[in-house]
Amino acid sequence: MGDAYCPDCKRGTEVVLDHSAGDTVCSECGLVLESHSVDETSEWRTFANESGDNDPVRVGGPTNPLLADGGLSTVISKPNGAQGDFLSSSLGRWQNRGSNPDRSLILAFKTIATMADRLGLVATIKDRANEIYKKVEDLKSVRGRNQDAILAACLYIACRQEDKPRTVKEICSVANGATKKEIGRAKEFIVKQLEVEMGQSMEMGTIHAGDFLRRFCSHLGMTNQAVKAAQEAVQKSEELDIRRSPISIAAAVIYMITQLSDDKKPLKDISLATGVAEGTIKNSYKDLYPYASRIIPTFFAKEEDLKNLCSP
């Protein structure tokens, strides 16, 4: 029910919406004020073949410019059940026999999406990894190489380029069996191939210790104040001439901060959370220890509190 102006009644009257016919009718004189109106509300009908499937989705996925057909080709689903399966199963077999130039790309994109989801990466990183793999695939240079390592390396490079880096060990944990050495070699191979193709150096982005810090602190369950102190300490450590990897510096700073807090973390837990060996953390801590008074913020620890740090 609603109000509208009726030309026969010469005034505003209540109208009735006939959804089946799409008509708007005056409730007093019966005049059709509007016909064949479009219902713009959501239509939650189920178009699935299976009676038990209540998925209300009635459209396909978005277009994919990386595929030859834009990702809009028809895929005949596998039959589920015994009745009426002859036609669909026959069509499915014929479709599988046909050549699909994008079949390998689709499988690669699914693998990248699975790895990205397991790492909790955003869609932009996944799309960038797909683009990198498509470029390498077009060069026809990945044949005979470890496919899992190539896909993992594409994801690693995409994380670097999107300024959301992940360690090789984190990528390796979702790489379907590819080792760190294989991923490292694949990364160098991809970068070299694309640099030759583009004729210029490939921008990878700079890694900072702060890129990993918050994630490592979250794994360790550190307090907000400790995380804030660790972030400030990492920023100040970049001004020092410490020739250690950013991941090692992040782990050493966390070890230093947790020693000064009430909730101390054992070195073993920090090693597990960061993926850095205990010996490497100790060596990085040894390099940072002389500068503790410069990098530890005063709101977190006073000068006399720094004496509680264990000597390397």
Image (spheres, rainbow, N blue to C red):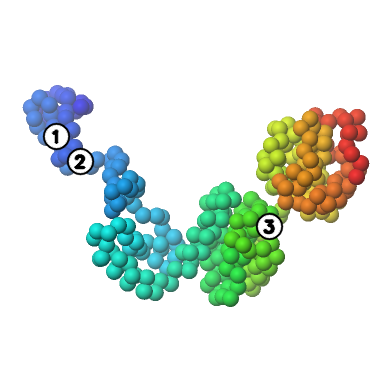
Q: Residue at x 11, y 35 (%)?
A: 32
Locate residue 244, reporting x and y percent. 82, 53
Residue 238 appears anywhere in the view: no
Picture quadrant where residue 12 is located:
top left
Relative height, residue 204 to residue 266 (above, below): below
Mark 2 belongs to which amino acid? Answer: Ser
Relative height, residue 147 to residue 283 (above, below): below
Instruction: Write down the residue under mark 1.
Output: 33
Quick one: SS at disc 2?
Answer: loop
The local crowd at label 1, few if under 14, some if 14 to 19, many if 20 or more residues have their Cα within 10 Å, is some
Locate residue 106, reporting x and y percent. 46, 64
Measured Cα–Cα span from mark 2 to mark 1 = 10 Å
Q: Residue at x 39, y 66 (%)?
A: 69
Instruction: Write down the residue under mark 3.
Output: 168
Locate residue 180, reporting x and y percent. 69, 62
**Sequence order check: which comes first, mark 1 or mark 3?**
1
Instruction: Write down the residue under mark 2.
Output: 37
Q: Nearer the viewer, residue 190 or 162?
A: 190
